[in-house]
Image (spheres, rainbow, N blue to C red):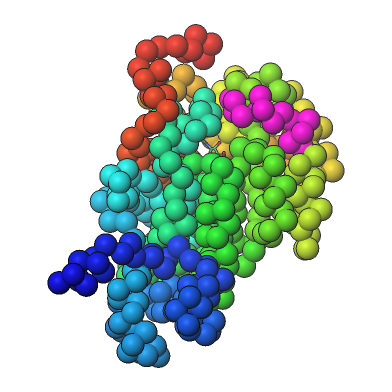
Amino acid sequence: MGELKQSAQIEKVNLLGLDRQGLADFFAALGEKPFRASQIMKWIHQQDVADFQQMSNISKSLRDQLDVLAEVKAPDVVLDELSDDGTRKWVLKLDDGNQIETVYIPESDRGTLCVSSQVGCALDCSFCSTGRRGFNRNLSTAEIIAQVWLATRLVDEEKKPGRKVTNVVLMGMGEPLLNFDNVVTAVHIMMDDFAYGLSKRRVTVSTAGVIPAMDKLGDVLDSRLAVSLHATNNELRDQLVPLNKKYPLEELIPACRRFIEKQNTRTRITFEYVMLDGVNDTDQHARELVKLLKGIPTMMNLIPFNPFKGSGYKTSSMKQVERFSQILIKSGMTTVIRRTRGDDIDAACGQLVGKVEDRSRRHRRFEEPRFGMYQ
Ligand code: SAH
């Protein structure tokens, strides 16, 4: 009895959160060889087996040990919604009651999974509804990878040709570079051939511009980087992306160059630019953008603003988005206008809110009208 009680108290290690090195260390502590790490990774991520007893190439005694010490556990799916355009959104409930969102976006040649990295977001970008709901905490590596693990299985279960997770973007809720270690470990798992085997071109980490972490990221990963730019001068960017006050444009742009220089292969930085009517979308802004990014290999993503209640912003007209993109294209910049996807199920950029027990008390500020400028 005493023994049972003791084993019930052991906090099990969730193996979803360990990359190959982490698993090798875990098995080393049990006196097992490092190759167990790749074996178990395959079972979990490729064969979709969470029950250790079914892992047939692992000895019975190790399976029994794993039952006591470890688990493969994903959050519960509390909502599973399919948009008219094929986009699918899941709301996941975490152990502490918070909820996060994950979105699958099918396109003709790929299936992109948009993954959250934090519960809420601390950055408070003025046009983003995630930010408005406040911030609670970082996601663990297991909670980040669980989104890929669940989505891969749920999309496979549809048995529809062409629907597969081929790309991952860390563009869901949160600022990935403020959850650096857990995000990097999660990306290792995404790229590991014994897990998801995604090539470096198919995993994108997105940031509002946390410069020291961008530098660190360039040292440890060669995934793609997306930078949420949204403005061409500090005055405007301070308002849209308050993080700019700490890391202004004259430091952000050189940091982008440094990131590129560290990559082994030729790569481009994706810049995201939300199109806000009358705020950052004039022809003049487009010309400033060309000047600002001169010499940086760029993939420009223009994102029509996805409205939400009380935002105080309007989406630029399609005509202006086109004009803006033409100015960029004529200057030689690769530019795409991101199609709004899944907005009927609130799955579009900046619409992911989950259910965040806000610890920043930010949402309270928004209960009262406050910002004269855009309202
Ligand atoms: N914090 C990271 C990851 C979030 S990615 C980052 O800032 O890059 C989500 C992207 O959607 C960001 O580029 C964000 O600025 C953009 N976005 C946020 N709210 C939006 C909205 N309402 N409409 C369109 N894009 C939005």
Q: Is residue 157 left or right of residue 140?
A: left
Q: Is residue 108 left or right of residue 155?
A: right
Residue nearest the observer in this picture, 317 or 123: 123
| The residue positioned farthest toward the front in the image shown | 2
| The residue positioned farthest toward the top in the image shown | 372
Q: Is residue 115 above or below residue 238?
A: below
Residue nearest the observer in this picture, 95 or 164: 95
Residue drawn at 48 percent across, 48 percent down = 117
Residue 80 coordinates in the image, percent (x, y): 29, 53
Instruction: Residue 263: name its quadrant.
Output: bottom right
Q: Is residue 317 left or right of residue 87?
A: right
Magenta-drawn stretch contains 247: yes
Instruction: Residue 231: name its quadrant.
Output: top right
Residue 34 coordinates in the image, percent (x, y): 54, 81
Q: Is residue 306 left or right of residue 317?
A: left
Residue 335 coordinates in the image, percent (x, y): 68, 44
Instruction: Residue 236: name its quadrant.
Output: top right
Magenta residue span: 240-253
Residue 146 coordinates in the image, percent (x, y): 40, 60
Magenta-drawn stretch contains 121: no
Residue nearest the observer in this picture, 236 or 214: 214
Residue 237 visible, this angle: yes
Residue drawn at 38 percent across, 64 percent down = 14
Magenta span dominant secondary structure: helix
Q: Is residue 42 above or below residue 76?
A: below
- Counting labels gives 0
Residue drawn at 40 percent across, 51 percent down = 102
Residue drawn at 30 percent across, 82 percent down = 64
| The residue positioned farthest toward the left in the image shown | 1
Quarter that holds the N terminus: bottom left
Q: Is residue 322 above or below residue 9?
A: above
